Image (cartoon, helix red, strand yellow):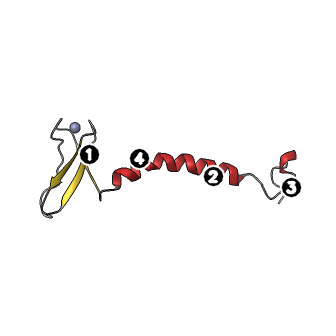
Amino acid sequence: MPNYDYECTACGHKFEAFQQMNDKVLTKCPKCSKKVKRLIGGGAGLIFKGSGFYATDYKKKSSSSGAPHACPKAKEGCTGCG
Ligand SMILES: [Zn+2]
């Protein structure tokens, strides 16, 4: 039987539900009865958490690679002579 991971959008409660493929998708948190979302695959939550890292990593990268390293006069204030 496949099991699905759910996460409550209100209280953040995470739980697994064992369901048949044709069972109804759960919509209610067992704790607070608010809306839950189904996490696709086990790693969906991780991707979400990692997106923060990604953003900062991307920023770092773009700021360093955005500078005109190729220009030898970049230090003197050349902002792009290429
Ligand atoms: Zn909840």
The vertical placement of 73 against 10, above or below, is below
Give the class, few, some or many, for how many residues have Cα within 10 Å of label 1's Cα (few <14, many ≥20).
many
Give the amino acid type for the residue marked by disc 4 in the picture.
Lys
Give the amino acid type for the residue marked by disc 3 in the picture.
Pro
For the residues marked 3 and 4, what is the alpha-carbon distance in whole angstroms? 39 Å
Q: Are marks 3 and 2 in contact (CB under 8 Å)?
A: no
Q: Is residue 66 left or right of residue 29?
A: right
For the residues marked 1 and 3, what is the alpha-carbon distance in whole angstroms? 52 Å
Task: For ligand 1, tell me if the residue under mark 4 lies within 8 Å.
Answer: no
For the residues marked 3 and 2, what is the alpha-carbon distance in whole angstroms? 20 Å
For the residues marked 2 and 4, what is the alpha-carbon distance in whole angstroms? 19 Å
For the residues marked 1 and 4, what is the alpha-carbon distance in whole angstroms? 14 Å
Residue 11 placed where, x, y %? 26, 36
Quarter in which the C terminus is drawn: bottom right
Give the amino acid type for the residue marked by disc 2 in the picture.
Lys
Quarter in which the N terminus is drawn: bottom left
For the residues marked 1 and 2, what is the alpha-carbon distance in whole angstroms? 32 Å
SS for tag 2?
helix
SS for tag 3?
loop
SS for tag 4?
helix
The residue sitting at 63% across, 52% down in the picture is 61
Give the amino acid type for the residue marked by disc 1 in the picture.
Glu
Q: Is residue 76 left or right of residue 58?
A: right
Label 1 or label 4, whichever comes before in sequence order: 1
**Which residue is label 4 attached to?**
49
Residue 80 placed where, x, y %? 81, 54
The residue sitting at 44% across, 49% down in the picture is 50
Q: Which of the numbered marks, if any, corresponds to residue 61? A: 2
Residue 58 placed where, x, y %? 58, 51
Q: Which of the numbered marks, if any, corresponds to residue 34? A: none
**Which residue is label 1 attached to?**
7
The residue sitting at 17% across, 43% down in the picture is 28
